[in-house]
Image (spheres, helix red, strand yellow):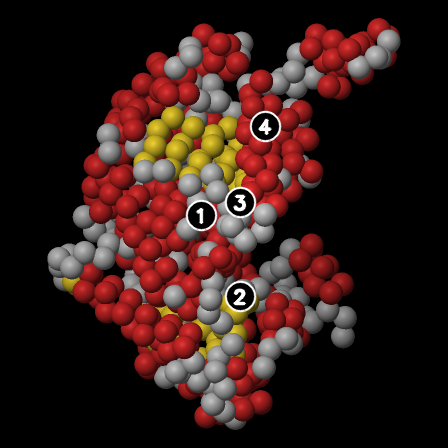
Amino acid sequence: MSAAVEDVFKALAADRAARAEEKVPDLFAADSGRFAAFSASFEDLLLDFSKCSLTPATLGLLIDLARAAGVEGKRAAMFAGEHINITEDRAVLHTALRDRSASPFTVDGQDVRADVADVLARMGAFAEGIRTGALKGWTGKPITDIVNIGIGGSDLGPVMATIALGPYHHGPRAHYVSNVDGAHLYDTIAELDPASTLFIVASKTFTTQETMANAASAREWIVEALGEAAVANHFAAVSTALDKVSAFGIAPGRVFGFWDWVGGRYSVWSAIGLPVMIAVGAENFGRFLDGGHAMDEHFRSTPLEKNLPVLLGLVGIWHREICGYATRAVIPYDQHLARLPAYLQQLDMESNGKHVTLDGKTVAHDTGPVVWGEPGTNGQHAFFQLIHQGTSPIPVEFLIAAHGHGEEKVAGLKRQHAMLIANCLAQSEALMRGRTLEEAKAQLIAAGRDEETAERIAPHRVFTGSRPSVTVAYEKLDPYTLGRLIALYEHRVFVEGAIWNINSFDQWGVELGKELANTLLPAVESGVAPASLSTSAAGLLHHLVRK
Ligand SMILES: O=P(O)(O)OC[C@H]1O[C@](O)(CO)[C@@H](O)[C@@H]1O
C-alpha cells in the first residue's frame, strides 16, 4: 500500500477517534441538509448513506483515499481490457457482455463485441425455440421444465435473477441444481417428466466435481427413460471449455460459449444467463444487460463525489477498515431479491476475501467483510434483535422499491407495499436514533408502570442508536433495474478491492478444499483412511463409513 494511501487511512482513523462519542442523531439535528449531502442518485436509483457516522470532512478524506489508491486509473485499466487479474493473467471484461454497441472492441486479438453479439443472438434463437415449443423433446413434447446444473457463479447469478424477475417469467419452469448432495438433483427431477425436461449444464471450466456428477446422473436419468439418442434434445451446455463439452456428447448447436475474461461470479451476463433468458425472454434479458451497461457508464463517467459504486465502496471501507465492523448485512425489502444476499456473498467474499496485496505481500489491513442477509420483513423477526441491541454494530444495507408488482391486480397489495416501506424506513430510523435510558424509563412510566419496575426494566429497552445503515431505493424491480443493482454491487466490490490493492478476480482460497476432497474420495469409497490424514479426519471417516 502506498505511503499516500497509508496517510489517508491514518487521517481517517484519527477522524474516527476524535468523533468517538459523537452521535449520528446529533449530526442530523445540526444539519438540515444532511440527507442531501450524504445521498446520491442515478436515474431513479437513490443511495442514502446519511445514517452513517460521516461528516463532510470524513467524506472528503474517503474521496482522497479513492484518488490516492488510484481507483480511477484501475477502473480505466479494467474497461480497457488490461490483464488486471494478474494471478491468472486475464482481462476482466464482464462489462463488455452488457455493452451492446456495434463498434469493434479488440482485446488480446479478439473482437470481443462481435463474439458477444454472436453468442447472444444464438442464445436468443435457442431461448425462443424452447419458449415457443419449436424446439421439442425427443418424443415431440414441448419443454415445460428447464434444469440448470451448475454451482457458484454458474448457479447463484441465474437463480437470483430468475427469482428477481419472477413477474416477467412467462417461459418454462426453471429449476436449479447445484449441490453434490444427490438429494438436490433427486428432489428436483422427482417432480419432472424426462420427455419435457431440458438440462443446461453450466460450468465455466466443465471440470467442477459437483456439476459433472449431477450432469452425469441427469444424463443417466434421460437415457434410462428415453434412450441414448434423446440426449441431443434434452441437454444444452454453457462453458468456456468447448472441447470438454463435446466429450460429454452435447450437440454443438446447443453449446454456448463464453470467455476466460468473464469471472464465474461475474458471469450471469454471459451465456450463463441462458436459463434466465429462457424464463423471461430475450427482450427482458436484453433490458437486464442494458441496466448493467447504464451502471457501467455511470461508474465510468460520474465524478467520484456523485458516483454510486464509489460511494457505496467508500462507505464499505469506512465500516470495515476504520470502524472495524466484521460483517455487513444486506436486507432487501423486496421478496423478489430473496437470493440477492447469497449472490452477494459469493460476489463480495470470493472477490475480496484476500490476505495478500497485488504484489504478494500480506495485507496490512482488514479486507472483505462477511456478507449475509435475508429479506425484510422476515429478518426483523429473526436476527434484528442482535442488530439493534447486540454488542457489535452491524452495518445494514437496505434495498426497497417505491412500487411492488401485482398492485393493479390485487387491491390489498398496495397497502402491503406501504407496510413494507414503513417497516424498511422504521428499521433504519430505529437503528440510527436508538432510545436512551431516560426515554425508556419515561415510556414505561407513561404506560402505567411503577417507578421501581420502570427502573429495573428500562435498561433492557435501551438502544444505543447511531447504528449505521445505507438504503438503496428504486422505482420498481424490473429487468433494467436489476441490471443496474447487480452492476452497482459489482463495481462497489471493485472499488473496495482497488483500495485494498488486492486481486478481486481470482479465488485461490477455494482450491485447497477441492484438492483434499479429491484425495479423500477414494478413502471414503474404500473406508480406509490414508496415514497422511489427521486423527480427526480419520476418526470422522471411520465414524461415517462403517463397512
Ligand atoms: O463454472 P465452474 O467452472 O463450474 O465453477 C463454479 C464455481 O467454482 C468456483 O471456482 C469456486 O469454487 C467459482 O469461482 C465458480 O463460480
- Gap in angstroms between the C-alphas marked 2 and 3: 21 Å
Of residues 546 and 6, the one nearer the viewer is: 6
Q: Secondary structure at mark 1?
A: loop
Image mark for residue 477: 1
Q: Percent x, y for residue 281?
A: 39, 66
- Gap in angstroms between the C-alphas marked 1 and 3: 8 Å
Q: CB atoms at circles 2 and 3 under 8 Å apart?
A: no
- For disc 2, the marked residue is 176
- For disc 4, the marked residue is 426
Q: Nearer the viewer, mark 2 or mark 3?
A: 3
- Gap in angstroms between the C-alphas marked 2 and 1: 22 Å
* Quadrant of the drawing holding the N terminus: top left
Instruction: Write the residue at 23% across / 50% down.
Output: 83
Q: Could you tell me if residue 360 is visible in this image?
A: no
- Gap in angstroms between the C-alphas marked 4 and 3: 15 Å
- For disc 3, the marked residue is 334
